[in-house]
Every structure is written in C-alpha cells, then in structure tokens.
Image (cartoon, grey):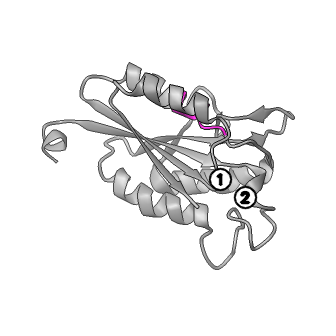
Amino acid sequence: MEYIAGGLQIEIMVAIDFTASNGDPQSPQSLHYMNPHAFNKYQDAIINVGEILEKYNHTKMFPSYGFGAKLPDGKVSHCFALNGSSSDPRCGGVKGVLDTYSKCLPNIQLFGPTNFAEVITVAANQARRAATHEYVVLLIITDGEISDLDKTIDAIVQASNLALSIIIVGK
C-alpha cells in the first residue's frame, strides 16, 4: 500500500485459455458455457480477481488476450487480442473484459495446446516499456496443464528482474 500511496501505478493484463480441454462451449459441463442465469467459471474468475486488481489500476483499461484458439482466419494463436485489435488490445475494466470475452467466444474455435510462454512474453515486454512508477500484473485464467513448460519457465526467468507479477487461476 505504501508503494501505491507513493504513486505506483498497477497495469493489469488478462489472458484467457481457449483450449479444447475446456469442453464444448455449448455443453453445460464446459468452463466456457454461457449460462443465461449464472456466470461461468471463467467469468467468475475475471470478476473475483479482476475486481480486486481493478481498484489499483488507474486507467481501468486492461489489455486482454486469449490463447490456444483457432481464429476465424484458420490460424491457431497462443496470444491474440480478445477485442481483435492487435494495436490496442485494451478493454474497459472488468465489465469490458467480460463483454469482450462474451463477444469473442462464438467467433473462435477452442483448440490448443495450453501454451503460456507467448502471453508471458507480451506481459514482460509491457513491463519493459513501463515507466519506473508502473507495475504490471498478468492474470492468466486456465483449465489445464502447461504444454510449453520449458518455454514458460524460460519466459518467467527472463522476466524475473522486471516489475511484473503473474497470477494463474486454474482448475
């Protein structure tokens, strides 16, 4: 709290797992199932962790990414902007992330594997560009085991001297 009181700015980034291991989004057993009467597990995680972090984010703008999906162009991506804009992947707070996630889900195909290294590298690059009074927090929401464990470890080690924390919420 002393750092925040002293002017430290927290930048929040979100990365959501769109791998096939989540199950068919049309099935109530899927973590991505859009129940008209309740939030799914991913929405719960975005809300429960995001609302805490949002209080410390001065811009209330969260760069938000997906990974492990086949995009409409047929390419599998391990780091794509949820809003479709590679030049500005930001969403307006928790509500913006929820809305963008809901709009993105029907337009992609769950695929795989569960690779974290690319989204961690994007967060590390953000931390490298950040001003001295900024701290980046990457929230990864996932269901499965990491498929690129060695590359993920390397990405974390390379980012270990940066103003970056990684929170992983998983099944």
Magenta-drawn stretch contains 45: no
Residue 4 occupies which quadrant of the picture? Answer: top left
Q: Residue 119: give x, y in percent of width and height.
A: 57, 34
Q: Is residue 73 above or below residue 140?
A: above
Q: Mark 1 = which residue?
A: 144
Residues tagged 2 and 1 counted as in contact (Cβ below 8 A)? yes
Q: Is residue 82 visible?
A: no
Q: Secondary structure at mark 2?
A: helix
Instruction: Answer with mark 2 or mark 1, whichever residue precedes in sequence.
Output: 2
In this rendering, position of residue 67 left or right of residue 20:
left
Q: Residue 69: give x, y in percent of width and height.
A: 75, 43
- Which residues lie in the magenta part? 115-122
Q: Mark 2 = which residue?
A: 22
Q: How many numbered circles are shown?
A: 2
Residue at the front extreme, as displayed? 150
**Residue nearest the viewer, comparing 60 with 130:** 130
Magenta-drawn stretch contains 120: yes
Q: Residue visible at 60% across and 56% down?
A: 99
Q: Is residue 60 above or below residue 148?
A: below
Q: Secondary structure at mark 1?
A: loop
